[in-house]
Image (cartoon, rainbow, N blue to C red):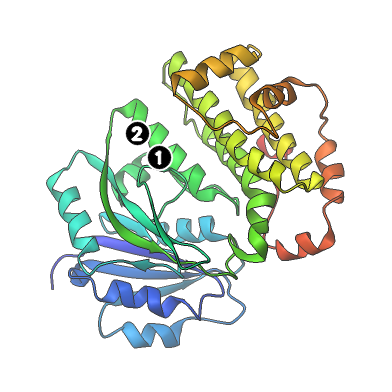
């Protein structure tokens, strides 16, 4: 038997109806003899995945890890990493697929031939509710799938997923890339899609008319950004790079916030603004030590040729809200009390983080 090279880690929660297709796409890989598959059962109420594993055990090496409590996909992936050992790591969601039989062979070949690379990213083919398909650039940092990570860099730099249930992949990738940035490491990308992000109307992200994105996107992005700072993600980088990091994060938040404003749901708009304000005052001001003027932020936008300002929520209003002294720590609790019960029930697996979590 040839030496194993890749660990594929699949966090699974209520995935019994979809995971077989995922495993089929892995089982047909041309280098399946170099792959170990680990399903991390995130305390699924429907039970284990042993019947599914039996279907594939003759074709590939596959095992299941069971968590005692539901922790979310981030911690499930952490446990998968801690219980595997191959040189490379790939994360696959339990309702998605690898596209072609040579997807893994192509990515592994590039990593083996380019030892300086610590991760190889590929484009993603995304399906929408109308069965239409579009490509997502592999350099986008909001996904951990369609990537082949070199394990020793992750372990040597103590890089793990944050304990959040929203945008935890952003926190992981951001920490990974910030650590690689100041160490001068190389990140590769190929423009060939290797991963199919399937549309499922009942999924956590896309279900309930995408309510999860409205309710939790900013929360997760902010908390993941704070996590990166707490883990030393900005240690040893130049001041100008640090300013760029904060401006880019604030711009990312704005891009999401302007979409939330379109929802016209004031309780979610207030919550999103609170989280942007929280990052600005908890992270930006203590580090940069100066208030961001509108003209400086717009100069930054011109420099990166950004052209995405919304008429209903302008850059001027955004910066004004960031600089306003209108929020207190108790405001978040007041805002959340206004969120209708039906939304809270649909997002029962979400744990919000507050300022106290970072003291």
Residue 21 in the image: state x and y as whole percent. Answer: 39, 77
Distance, label 2 to label 1, CA atoms, is 6 Å
For this rendering, which residue is in front, 110 or 319?
319
Q: Position of residue 180 (x, y in %)?
A: 34, 33
Q: Position of residue 314 (x, y in %)?
A: 67, 28
Q: Nearer the viewer, residue 196 or 8?
A: 196
- The answer to which quarter of the image holds residue 325 is top right
Mark 1: few/some/many CA within 10 Å (<14, 14-19, 20+): many
C-beta proximity under 8 Å, tags 2 and 1: yes
SS of the residue under disc 1: helix
Which residue is found at the position 44% from the left and 88% from the top? 51
Q: Report the residue marked by disc 2.
A: 180
Q: Residues within 10 Å of mark 2 (few under 14, many from 20)?
A: some
Q: How far across and how far down the image is residue 125, in percent?
A: 37, 59
Element type at mark 2: helix
Image-quadrant location for residue 20? bottom left
Please say if 237 is above or below 203: above
Task: Find the residue positioned furthest to the front.
Answer: 311
Q: Which mark is residue 189?
A: none
Work out whether residue 243 can be spotted. Answer: no
- Rendered view: 290 above or below 208: above
Quadrant assignment for the C terminus: top right
Q: Which mark is residue 176?
A: 1
The N terminus, quarter of image = bottom left
Residue visible at 36% across and 26% down in the picture:
182
Point 54% across, 25% down: residue: 246
Report whether 268 appears left or right of 106: right
Residue 44 in view, yes or no: yes
Q: State left or right for residue 202 relative to residue 193.
A: right
């Amino acid at each position: 038997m040839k030496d194993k090279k890749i660990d594929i880690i699949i966090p699974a929660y209520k995935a019994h109806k979809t995971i077989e297709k995922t495993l089929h796409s892995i089982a047909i890989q041309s280098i399946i003899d170099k792959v170990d598959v680990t399903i991390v059962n995130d305390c699924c109420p429907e039970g284990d995945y042993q019947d599914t594993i039996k279907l594939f055990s003759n074709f590939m090496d596959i095992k299941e890890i069971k968590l005692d409590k539901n922790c979310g996909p981030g911690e499930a992936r952490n446990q998968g990493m801690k219980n595997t050992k191959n040189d490379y790591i790939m994360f696959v969601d339990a309702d998605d697929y690898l596209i072609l039989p040579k997807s893994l062979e192509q990515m592994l070949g590039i990593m083996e031939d380019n030892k300086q690379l610590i991760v190889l990213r590929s484009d993603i083919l995304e399906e929408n509710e109308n069965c239409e398909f579009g490509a997502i650039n592999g350099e986008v940092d909001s996904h951990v799938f369609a990537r082949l990570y070199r394990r020793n860099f992750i372990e040597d730099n103590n890089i793990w997923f944050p304990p959040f249930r929203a945008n935890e992949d952003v926190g992981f990738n951001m920490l990974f890339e910030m650590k690689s940035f100041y160490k001068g490491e190389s990140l590769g990308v190929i423009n060939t899609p290797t991963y199919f992000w399937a549309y499922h109307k009942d999924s956590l992200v896309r279900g309930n008319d995408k309510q999860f994105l409205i309710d939790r996107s900013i929360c997760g992005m902010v908390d993941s950004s704070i996590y990166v700072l707490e883990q030393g993600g900005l240690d040893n980088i130049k001041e100008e790079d640090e300013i760029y990091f904060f401006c880019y994060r604030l711009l990312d938040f704005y891009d999401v916030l302007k979409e939330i404003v379109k929802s016209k749901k004031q309780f979610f708009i207030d919550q999103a603004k609170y989280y942007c304000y929280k990052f600005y005052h908890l992270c930006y001001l203590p580090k940069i030590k100066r208030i961001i003027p509108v003209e400086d932020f717009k100069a930054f936008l011109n420099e990166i040729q950004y052209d995405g300002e919304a008429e209903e929520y302008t850059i001027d209003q955004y910066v004004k809200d960031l600089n306003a002294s209108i929020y207190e720590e108790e405001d978040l609790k007041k805002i959340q009390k206004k969120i209708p019960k039906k939304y809270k029930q649909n997002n029962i697996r979400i744990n919000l983080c507050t300022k106290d979590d970072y003291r």
